[in-house]
Each structure stands twice: as structure tokens, then as C-alpha cells.
Image (tube, rainbow, N blue to C red):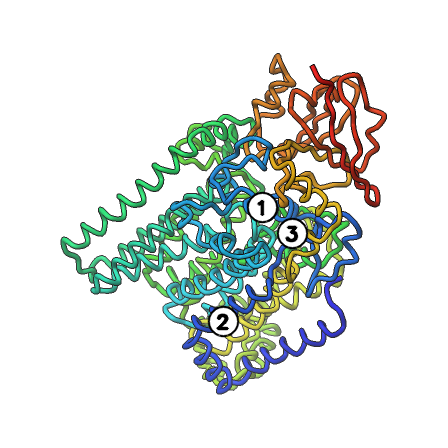
């Protein structure tokens, strides 16, 4: 499913080369110095190469009307479960090529639709500065624009996460790279890579923290001006992600970190009247930009806030604590058959090794008695958000804190990101843990076990301090108690996950998880002032990141798999001759948004907010308003029976449309796999104008009044 033989061989060569480099200190140091010194130009060169060759990770091959399995990705497979990516976000971006990248477009929903605010798309407008990863669409072809969007965000997240790791770990490159890999290639990020603005939130939220820290540590006002402009874009971009379920808890995290950074630097921060001017500049530009967007999109905002879904959502807290351990199973979501229909929407975590983050925090803060503003601030917000997840609260709390706009699973996965921040900061501060002391206290009554754990040590029995030199791997692995503790914790986590989740493990999975996570926990416990353990941790992270995240999305080149299809080219030809006609996609077996990339004004394409004018024209008494007043996908079926609306799930309702109501909606064309000739009536005639391997286009003829 995932590799040809040559890909597999190449993959093994890369993996073993990385392990070889990491295993030899001199080679590792030389390579790391080179990569670190030239990281920005290297990232830029890689980005340009990928854009030139139109490399991206979209599952756009799923839009193939024929045998999608016959399409070969460069690596990996396209996934039907990622429909919000290929059938919503990507096709919406392509549709903008047919309206001059306007702020409002009638291609989506066949009525003027806000394309900037919700599911933000590329637009020719000054406020497009807050969406820099869309700029490629404005100047490049769809394939290169998609590559610019996809690869640009991936590389930016890697780079900014690495710099964030350098800040959190006080410039520990090994741990910083581990952090960047864990976050960028986490199941959460990769399964949701192209939708709901998650990547943008993480990029610009972290960038804002780094800019605040840099601003307070430089005395150059030219650099402070650049930091101010960067903060304007970062905060504006974060706000315009417009997905409160993730945005609100992430905002709490980044706001807390901002305050902590300020407190960390306030004593050394030198300021003058020029900083007041920069502050006014920041407030003015950001404020005017947001006000302009509000004026342009206020009807969109009002419509969204008054929807049945998601506008009326008010999550009052409460969730299953056992789900916090399910991050361990997400390692396999990318490599099990799609037919298993894994609920990745709910269980895509940042792999954070919970509860080790809390254990290390306790050790650093209370055992080693380090008082760290960043770490303590992270723990404060962790307690706040964790309490909201664990317990139910009065509805007013959810409204006041805005956490009511989240959900239990959305909040839980953000907590896993917060876990990772605490873990990495703790590892950066951690000093050597003297496990011999614990060993003496815990196992003093179990002489046999204590003797076994002491085997290999050259210390005298009455020497309670373990004085390792940490000069090699052999000495590291002599610390048997930490090895036992690591595997014991993983065994407990696995037991809880097996008992409390819906994921079905087999023995092979259990063994693999025990080995990979057991050694990961072992290396984490020994990472204090130990470069060997930190390197071992990085090796484990690279394996986890590859399987858990890097295999989620395919590696593709170009978009011809969609645009070269004969039926799509025919629709494009019709649109050129009749550009303002209204279409519907009818029946099963076709993605509803299949036609909007070629500019077809599709009435039942995804309703990013409800098309009340159209749907209420079919529902004179507003009996079904709660059904269609929502963000929704709208599968449509033509019938001679009465028109009816049926709610399928929170974001899907089906429309059974009486053919005589087509005129009310001003529909001109129908794209379908069904034979519609039997639905002709005195009021409507279906004239078949195209038929290719079962895919038909009908032109609707209404009698002249």
C-alpha cells in the first residue's frame, strides 16, 4: 500500500544513515553544525525545489472519477478519510482561479460566499498579508500554488518549532530537533494538516512567542520594528484561523507563554519612548485590519454565530481521563487499512509521553528545586485547561472563558501539545537523576532484585551515590532501574489504553509499542545532562514521527490526476461558454465539490455557512431551519416526491429535491451518474448533453412562461 520495493530500500538507507550519523559523536557534531549554520538557506532551497516540481501532500487523487487505486503516488497513499482536505479546502482554493481571487465568490454555494474568513482562501486583498502561505496561488499555477501552500507550511512549522525548542531547552539542539519532529510529524498535525487552520495556529503562535522574546533582548530599534511587524502578521494570522475548538485553548497557552516571556525578561528589558510608538503602530495596524475584515465579513460572522452547528455549541467541560493515554495507539493509524475506519478525527494526538511530562515537572521543581517561570506558567495553564476537561462546569463558565466553543476531544489533543511543551522544557532543565538513591529506598527489602539491579556496577554497596561518567552507551544501559521503570510505565499506559479505548491491538502492535516507547521513556529519564540519552531519545522520536505522522499524507507531484479527466474538462468547457449557470451534483458516487475547481457554480457544494435564501425557498414554513442552518455538506437527490431535508450528522444534511423545485433554485445543469430521463415532467425536461463512462451532464430546460 505504501511503498514499492525501491522506495523501501531507499527508506532503509536513509534511516540507517541517520542512525549511523547520530551514533558517532564526531560525525554527528560536524553534520549538526553544518545543518544548524545553514538551516535557513537549506530550507529555502528545498522549498524552491518542491514548488518547481509541484510536490505536495494532498489526497487529490481521491477526486478521480474512475479507478483511484490505479493512481500511484510518489510515496504513500491518498486517503478518503481526508475529504475535508481534498474535497473542501483544496478545491475551494482552486476555484478562486476562476473569479480573480475575489473576497466573495459565487462559485461556492452558487451565491455570493465569503472566501476569506471561513476556510480562508487566497484573495487579492491587502488583508491577504495575514495568509502568507496562500500567496503562491496568486502568482503560480494551481499545482505550484498547492505545493507552495503545502510545503511552505510544513517547512515553516519545522523551522519555527525548532527555534521554539531552542528557546524552551536553552539551545539544546538535540532536544530542539526532537521537539520539532514530535510536533510537525505528530498524528494531530498530519491528519489535520490542511484544514481548520491548525498548522497556522502552531506556526504563528510559536512565532509570536519567539518575536516577543527577541524584541525584549535586542536594543536595535530596526530589529524591534521588524519584530513588531512580525507580531502584527502572527497575531492577525492566528486570529483569522477561525476554528475556536482549537483556537481558544491554544490562545490560552500562547498568551500564558507571552506573559512568562515578559516576566523572564523584564529586568533586563531596556525601553524608551520609541517602544510606545511601536506599540501604537502595532495596535493601529492590527486594529484597523481586524475592523476592516469585520466590516467586510460581518454578515458571515452573524450567520455563523446563529447556526445550529457550530454556532450554538457550548461545551461545559468534562471528558474521559482514560483517553489521555490513547496517544500511544495513534502510532499505527497511518499504516492500518482504511477499511478499519479509525476515528482519527478524535484520536489524533501529539505524542507527548504523558504522564512523564508531569513526573519530570515534579522532579525539576520539587526534587531538584529549580524555580522556572516558563515551566511553572505552563503548569498553571495545564491545571486550568485540564480541570475544564476533567470536570463539568456551569454553562456560564464556558461562555465567559470561550472554552464552550471547544469540545472534549479537541481540548484533549491540545492538552497533549501542552504536555509536550512541559516535557521538553523539563528535559532542558533536568539534571542527572540519581536512581541509585531510589533503588536503595524502594528495593531495600527485596535483596535479590536489588542485587540484580546493582549488577554491572563497580560501586561499593555502601556507596549510595551513583557516579556515572556518561562516557558511552554501555554505561548508560547499566542503569537498569530506569530501564525497568520506563518499560513498566509503558506497560501501564498500554494496559489503560487497551482497556479504555476502542482501538483493537494485536500482539505485534503491543510488542512494537513496548520496545519503542519503553526505550523512549528510558532515554527521557536519563536525559538530564546526558548527551547519549538525548541522542537515543532523538532516534526514537525519528522512528515515532515517521510512522505516526510522516506516512499519513501521500507525496504527490502535480494535479493532473484531477484536471486531466474527460468529464471535468467537459464541465470546464461548458463553464467557459456559460460561466454564471448554476449546477448541482446529484446522487451517490461523486464528491459534491467535484466541479468547483473548474469554476462551476455549484448550489449544493459545501455550505461553509448556510445558504438560507435558497433552502428557505423550499421550506416556506421554516420547519426544517434547524436542519439546514449549519455548516454542512449537502448530498442531493432528485425525485418526483415532495422536497425534504434530512439531518445525517452534525455537518451533513441530505436534500431530496422535487424536480419541479429546480426552477426555484435557478438550476441549469446537473452532473450525475444517474439516468434522469424518467424524471421529465411538464415543468422540467432533462436534456442529456454529455455521457462518458457513466458520468452524465444534463442541461435543464424549463417551459417558456
2 and 1 marks in contact (CB < 8 Å): no
What is the count of numbered marks? 3
Q: Which quadrant does the N terminus fall into?
A: bottom right
- Position in image of residue 511 (x %, y %): 71, 65
1 and 3 marks in contact (CB < 8 Å): no
Q: CA distance from mark 1 to mark 3?
A: 33 Å
- Position in image of residue 575 (x %, y %): 65, 40
Q: Is residue 449 above or below residue 229?
A: below
Label 1 vs 3, first from the N-terminus:
1
Give whichever of 568, 461 is nearer the camera: 568
Instruction: Indicate which disc residue 497 carries.
Output: 3
Local secondary structure at mark 1: helix
Q: Can residue 390 be seen? A: no
Residue highlighted by disc 2: 45
Q: Count neighbours of disc 3 (C-alpha within 10 A) and say few if under 14, some if 14 to 19, many if 20 or more.
A: many
- Position in image of residue 4 (x %, y %): 75, 69
Q: Can residue 326 be seen? A: yes
Q: CA distance from mark 2 to mark 1?
A: 27 Å
3 and 2 marks in contact (CB < 8 Å): no
Give whichever of 22, 500 is nearer the camera: 22
Residue highlighted by disc 1: 89
Q: Count neighbours of disc 2 (C-alpha within 10 A) and say few if under 14, some if 14 to 19, many if 20 or more.
A: few
Q: Count neighbours of disc 1 (C-alpha within 10 A) and say few if under 14, some if 14 to 19, many if 20 or more.
A: some
Give the quadrant of residue 513. Answer: bottom right
Q: Residue at point 76% right, 55% down?
A: 337
Local secondary structure at mark 2: helix
Label 3 vs 2, first from the N-terminus:
2
Q: Is residue 347 above or below residue 577?
A: below
Describe residue 453's horizontal placement relative to residue 358 as left or right: right
Amino acid at each position: 500500500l505504501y511503498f514499492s520495493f525501491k522506495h523501501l530500500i531507499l527508506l532503509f538507507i536513509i534511516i540507517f544513515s541517520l542512525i549511523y550519523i547520530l551514533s558517532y559523536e564526531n560525525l554527528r557534531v560536524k553534520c549538526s553544525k553544518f545543518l544548524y549554520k545553514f538551516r535557513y538557506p537549506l530550507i529555502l532551497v528545498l522549498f524552491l525545489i518542491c514548488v518547481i516540481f509541484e510536490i505536495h501532500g494532498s489526497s487529490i487523487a481521491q477526486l478521480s472519477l474512475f479507478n483511484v487505486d490505479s493512481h500511484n503516488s510518489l510515496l504513500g497513499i491518498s486517503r478518503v478519510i481526508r475529504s475535508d482536505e481534498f474535497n473542501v479546502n483544496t478545491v475551494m482554493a482552486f476555484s478562486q482561479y476562476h473569479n480573480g481571487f475575489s473576497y466573495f465568490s459565487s462559485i461556492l454555494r452558487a451565491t455570493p460566499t465569503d472566501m476569506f474568513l471561513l476556510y480562508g482562501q487566497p484573495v487579492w486583498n491587502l488583508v491577504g498579508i495575514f495568509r502568507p502561505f496562500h500567496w503562491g496561488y496568486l502568482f503560480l499555477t494551481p499545482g505550484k500554488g498547492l505545493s507552495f501552500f503545502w510545503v511552505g507550511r510544513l517547512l515553516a512549522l519545522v523551522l519555527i518549532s525548532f527555534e521554539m525548542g531552542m528557546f524552551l531547552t536553552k539551545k539544546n539542539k538535540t532536544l530542539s530537533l526532537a521537539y520539532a519532529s514530535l510536533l510537525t510529524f505528530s498524528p494531530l498535525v498530519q491528519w489535520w494538516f490542511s484544514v481548520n487552520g491548525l498548522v497556522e495556529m502552531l506556526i504563528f503562535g510559536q512565532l509570536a512567542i519567539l518575536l516577543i522574546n527577541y524584541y525584549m533582548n535586542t536594543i536595535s530599534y530596526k530589529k524591534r520594528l521588524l519584530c513588531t511587524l512580525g507580531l502584527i502578521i502572527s497575531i492577525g494570522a492566528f486570529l483569522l484561523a477561525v476554528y475556536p475548538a482549537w483556537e481558544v485553548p491554544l490562545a490560552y497557552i500562547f498568551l500564558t507563554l507571552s506573559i512568562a516571556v515578559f516576566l523572564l525578561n523584564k529586568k533586563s528589558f531596556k525601553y524608551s519612548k520609541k517602544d510606545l510608538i511601536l506599540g501604537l503602530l502595532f495596535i493601529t495596524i492590527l486594529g484597523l485590519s481586524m475592523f476592516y475584515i469585520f466590516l467586510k465579513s460581518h454578515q458571515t460572522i452573524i450567520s455563523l454565530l446563529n447556526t445550529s452547528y457550530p454556532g450554538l455549541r457550548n461545551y461545559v467541560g468534562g471528558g474521559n481521563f482514560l483517553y489521555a493515554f490513547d496517544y500511544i495507539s495513534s502510532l499505527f493509524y497511518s499504516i492500518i487499512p482504511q477499511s478499519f475506519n479509525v476515528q482519527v478525527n478524535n484520536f489524533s494526538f501529539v505524542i507527548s509521553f504523558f504522564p512523564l511530562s508531569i513526573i519530570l515537572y515534579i522532579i525539576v521543581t520539587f526534587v531538584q528545586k529549580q524555580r522556572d517561570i516558563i515551566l511553572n506558567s505552563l503548569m498553571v495553564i495545564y491545571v486550568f485547561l485540564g480541570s475544564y476537561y476533567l470536570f463539568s462546569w456551569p454553562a456560564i463558565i464556558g461562555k465567559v472563558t470561550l472554552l464552550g466553543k471547544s469540545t472534549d476531544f479537541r481540548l484533549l489533543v491540545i492538552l497533549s501539545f501542552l504536555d509536550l511543551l512541559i516535557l521538553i522544557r523539563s528535559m532542558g532543565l533536568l539534571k542527572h537523576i540519581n536512581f541509585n538513591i531510589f533503588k536503595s529506598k524502594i528495593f531495600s527489602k527485596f535483596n535479590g532484585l536489588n542485587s540484580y539491579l546493582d549488577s554491572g556496577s563497580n560501586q561499593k554497596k555502601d556507596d549510595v551515590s551513583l557516579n556515572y561518567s556518561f562516557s558511552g552507551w554501555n554505561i548508560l544501559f547499566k542503569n537498569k532501574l530506569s530501564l525497568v521503570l520506563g518499560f513498566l510505565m509503558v506497560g501501564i499506559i498500554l494496559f489503560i489504553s487497551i482497556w479504555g479505548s476502542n482501538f483493537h491491538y494485536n500482539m505485534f502492535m503491543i510488542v512494537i509499542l513496548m520496545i519503542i516507547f519503553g526505550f523512549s521513556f528510558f532515554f527521557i529519564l536519563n536525559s538530564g545532562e546526558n548527551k547519549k540519552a538525548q541522542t537515543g531519545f532523538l532516534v526514537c522520536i525519528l522512528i515515532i514521527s515517521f510512522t505516526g505522522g510522516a506516512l499519513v499524507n501521500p507525496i504527490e507531484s502535480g494535479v493532473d490526476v484531477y484536471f486531466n479527466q474527460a468529464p471535468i474538462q467537459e464541465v470546464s468547457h461548458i463553464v467557459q461558454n456559460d460561466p454564471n449557470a448554476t449546477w448541482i451534483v446529484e446522487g451517490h458516487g461523486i464528491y459534491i465539490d467535484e466541479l468547483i475547481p473548474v469554476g462551476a457554480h455549484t448550489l449544493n457544494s459545501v455550505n461553509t455557512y448556510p445558504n438560507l435564501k435558497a433552502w428557505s425557498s423550499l421550506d416556506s414554513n421554516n420547519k426544517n431551519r434547524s436542519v439546514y442552518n449549519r455548516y454542512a455538506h449537502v448530498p442531493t437527490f432528485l425525485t418526483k416526491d415532495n422536497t425534504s431535508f434530512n439531518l445525517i450528522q452534525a455537518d451533513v444534511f441530505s436534500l431530496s429535491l422535487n424536480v419541479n423545485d429546480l426552477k426555484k433554485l435557478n438550476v441549469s445543469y446537473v452532473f450525475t451518474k444517474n439516468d434522469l430521463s424518467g424524471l421529465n415532467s411538464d415543468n422540467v425536461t432533462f436534456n442529456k448533453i454529455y455521457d462518458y463512462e457513466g458520468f452524465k451532464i444534463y442541461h435543464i430546460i424549463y417551459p417558456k412562461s
